[in-house]
Image (spheres, rainbow, N blue to C red):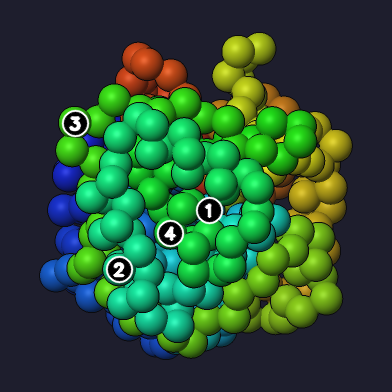
Amino acid sequence: MRDELYSTGKATAAVSAVLCQLALPHVDATPDEPAAPIVKWAGGKTRLLPELLRRLPPEGFGRYIEPFAGGAALFLALRPRRAILADTNPTLIETYRVVQCGPAPLLTVLQDHASAHSTAHYYACRERFNARMDGELERAALLIYLNKTCFNGLFRVNKRGEFNVPCGRQARPAICEESTLARAHEALQRVELRNEPFTTLLSYARRGDLIFLDPPYVPVSKTASFTAYDVGGFDERAQRKLRKVFGALDRRGCRLMLTNSDAEAVRQLYRGYHIDVVTTRRSISCRQRELVNELIVRNYDDSQRRSA
């Protein structure tokens, strides 16, 4: 199946339509006002949500687990009642913990940043963020502020682990989004948050869990690679390790859905599983917004849903 999603607005409307049709137990999705990511993250899944939602296990699932949380777009749209979100970025997980506890203090700090926003303030905050001297609340506010005001909403670190994205040129950046934080707070209430790599899945995943794997993508060209979410990056060796974990979880009886680029290496790695090609627009890593093919890999089919 190939579907083209041309804008975030169209994708949001499509998400609402699909959520209205879902009849899955143990989820609290709100079709009228689906929760949205609180940060813009490279490789975010907002535009791809309709295709992901249509491919959920038709019989339902136990816990929802996402080991490459990033912006957590699928989790926020679905709002499962039992979930684990993990990521190797410690400040991102800290930020989710702050929102989980309550967004009011965070909103107060973000309002201060919004009032002070300027190029000079941005670079002062970037330096402060990299100094790692603040507490969780301040660092969460800094992460969101920098994410909303940096160039192209790109989170990137250098080999020293320092955030190094220049200031963006947005005329009116949406720094303080009260309703978005409030809905995320509600969605995070029954979530276990972990700052750890995907390999730890093998220590706690169990039969019936739905595990959504959205790793940094295999590059489709020499200039397309972007894996600098954290210091370690994500190379070919990591992709192969992920494939081994995928196989082990499959044998355990977990329900697995994985996204990656439409690269021959990915097709070979996951040969024998259900692979769908979808088309979406990518806009975070280059100036020119292009339609690209991506792969959705699953260890289950959706024939039961299609025949319903």
Q: Secondary structure at mark 1?
A: loop
Q: Is residue 118 left or right of residue 84?
A: left
**Residue 222 can be seen, yes or no:** yes
Q: Which residue is mark 4?
A: 141
Distance (Cα) linking label 2 and label 1: 24 Å
Disc 1 to disc 4, C-alpha distance: 16 Å
Q: CA distance from mark 3 to mark 4?
A: 20 Å
Judge the density around disc 2: few (<14), some (14-19), many (≥20) Cα neighbours within 10 Å: few
Q: Nearer the viewer, residue 251 or 48?
A: 48
- Mark found first going from the N terminus, 1 or 4: 1
Gap between marks 1 and 3 measured at Cα: 25 Å
Nearest to the observer: residue 79 or residue 14? 79
Give the label, 2 or 3, closer to the camera: 2
The residue located at (60%, 13%) in the rendering is: 223
Badge 4 crowding class, 10 Å Cα cut-off, few under 14, some 14 to 19, many 20 or more, is: many
Disc 3, SS: loop
Label 3 vs 4, first from the N-terminus = 4
Mark 2 or mark 1: whose residue is earlier in sequence: 1
Sequence order check, earlier mark of 2 and 3: 2
Residue drawn at (23%, 50%) of the image: 115
State yes or no: discs 2 and 4 in contact (Cβ < 8 Å). Answer: no
Determine which residue is flagged by label 3: 171
Check disc 1 and report the residue beneath it: 70
Q: Nearer the viewer, mark 2 or mark 1?
A: 2
Q: Amino acid at mark 3?
A: Ala
Q: Estimate the x, y position of residue 230 in percent, counting from the top left.
A: 69, 43
Say what amino acid the circle numbered 2 marks: Thr
Please say if 97 is above or below 7.
below
Which disc, if any, is residue 108?
A: 2
Q: What is the quadrant of the N terminus in the image?
A: top left
| Mark closer to the observer (1, 3) | 3
Q: Which residue is at a point 76% across and 36% down the rendered structure image?
A: 160
